[in-house]
Amino acid sequence: MPQTEERINAIEREITGIRSDVRLQNAMLIKCGEQMSDLRTGQHELRKGQEELLTITTDLRAGQEELRATTADLRAGQEELRATTADLRAGQEEMRETLEEFRSAFSVVLDEVRQQKAWREEFSDKVARVIAKSEGLDS
């Protein structure tokens, strides 16, 4: 019977080894489960990060489009300002020409006034002599 006992002991050792292996496998399965959970959490965080990056990229593109539109508006405003400036310069030139024409006309009128004043003074002197002669005051 020693063989039976030896066999039973050997079987018990095998069962103990198997139990130890099962416990080790259970511990490994638990560890794998924890690692899977960590991987899922990491994957979730990665997706969240990717979504945030996509949001940032979308916002950046929208900002770039807004900047392009603003730049286009500014360029249009600049062109409009240039056209207005050209119109103002043309108007300024017209005003200079009109002012020059006015100065010329004023000079002509002033000359005419001077001539009339000189004629009036000369005529007044002649009238005064004629009146003096007619009154016999002429000596």
Image (tube, rainbow, N blue to C red):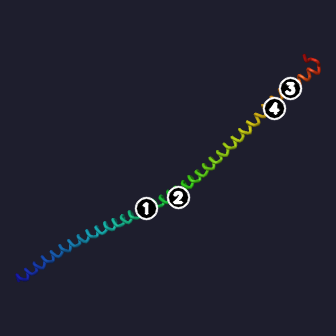
Residue farthest to the top? 139
Compare marks 3 and 2 and give the one earlier in the sequence. 2
Q: Position of residue 91 (x, y in %)?
A: 65, 47
At a point 60% along the width and 52% down the height, the residue shown is: 83
- Mark 2 / mark 1, whichever is N-terminal: 1
In 3D space, how far apart are the residues under numbered discs 2 and 4 (Cα atoms)? 69 Å
Q: Position of residue 57 (x, y in %)?
A: 43, 61
Q: Secondary structure at mark 2?
A: helix
Measured Cα–Cα span from mark 4 to mark 1:
86 Å
Which residue in the structure is indicated by mark 1?
57
Pick the residue in front: 28 or 51.
Answer: 51
Q: Is residue 120 left or right of residue 99?
A: right
Q: Nearer the viewer, mark 2 or mark 1?
A: 2
**Measured Cα–Cα span from mark 1 to mark 3:** 96 Å
Res 24 quadrant in image: bottom left
- Single out the mark in the foreground, 2 or 4: 4
